[in-house]
Amino acid sequence: MKRLLAALLCAAAPAMAQVSALPPDVQSVLRETGTAMGPEPFNRTGAAFAPLMPPAGPTLVDAQYGPDPRNRLDVFSPHAPLGPGARPVLVFVHGGGFIGGDKTRPGLHYYQNIGGWAARNGMVGVTITYRLAPAHQFPAVIEDITAALAWVRANIAAHGGDPARIILFGQSAGAAHVADYLAANAAAPGVAAGVLVSGVYDAASYPAGPTARSYYGDDEALLRARSALPGLARLTIPMVTANAEFDPAPFHAQGALLPQRMRARHMLLRGHNHVSPVFGFGSADVELSNAILTLR
């Protein structure tokens, strides 16, 4: 396993270790949490970044985009909109192991930091919440993303956004859901660009467990049929894909599947754990966020 992980890290496109721009105590937290998953390292990472976050800015909170109580989204608009339809739109889909997560959590900065960052950088930010497994299994979140994007296209011009310039961005389970949506709509994705960070793209080769299988199921034939890889190979929109250096090995293995099948800018975010690339949006580490700016 160590040899596999080393090979995958070497295969990723090299990137500047801009994590060095973060305060030493934050870098220490990222090293110490390493590849650990679960509430403790996630909460510790979020707490480390919280003091670095600027205010999120003006927000339209809890717009309903579909019939389920979790079909909600927030919109983050610049203080001085250029006018209807003038700005690109960044739509973020959160992680949570397919069974948890939300667009924001009371008292915590994420994922308002991503919407606020978008608004401060010439875009309109949108963060969405979606239905969860095991009550809602594949393709439920493809349906939810479809509905959320329909809401964005119908309403975002009123907030200064251009419905023809949507960047769809997901991390962890959110990246899996974004990949599934793009794969199912490869011929006409309805978005201008995509970003996939530390996701699951082929559930059949991802280790069996109570997370991904709670959404994709256990039937091996269905798991193969539900792989996003064939659809991703047909995409023609600009894409950025990334893994964190301290992602657990299965996430690196999933990320390594992408360069073989799709054209994208592939990044290895050195010094980061599984959640820190998104928990740290708006901080001095601009490696991933600058890559997204090139997609506008």
Image: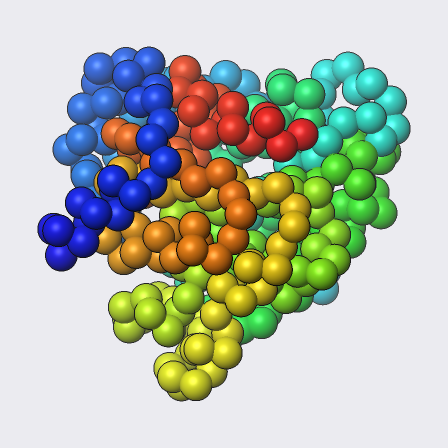
Total labels: the figure holds 0
Q: Looking at the picture, how far across and down is residue 199, in whole percent?
A: 41, 53
> Is residue 234 shown left or right of residue 134?
right
Quadrant in the picture for residue 78: top right
Which residue is at a point 68% across and 62% down the rendered structure image?
185
Which residue is at a point 58% across and 64% down the rendered structure image?
231
Which residue is at a point 37% across and 51% down the rendered structure image?
255
Q: Looking at the picture, how far across and down is residue 259, in whole percent?
A: 43, 50
279 is higher (above) or lower (below) than 147 = above
Observer-nearest of 154 and 105:
154
Name the residue furthest left: 2
Q: Is residue 47 visible?
A: no
16 is higher (above) or lower (below) than 211 = above
Q: Looking at the picture, how far across and down is residue 284, in whole percent?
A: 41, 15
Q: Is residue 245 visible?
A: yes
Which residue is at a point 65% across and 24% down the rendered structure image?
119
Figure quadrant of the N terminus: bottom left
Q: Looking at the picture, how far across and down is residue 67, in whole percent?
A: 72, 64
Quadrant in the picture for residue 150: bottom right
> Is residue 228 shown left or right of residue 6?
right
56 is higher (above) or lower (below) than 147 = above
Figure quadrant of the C terminus: top right
Colour pattern:
rainbow
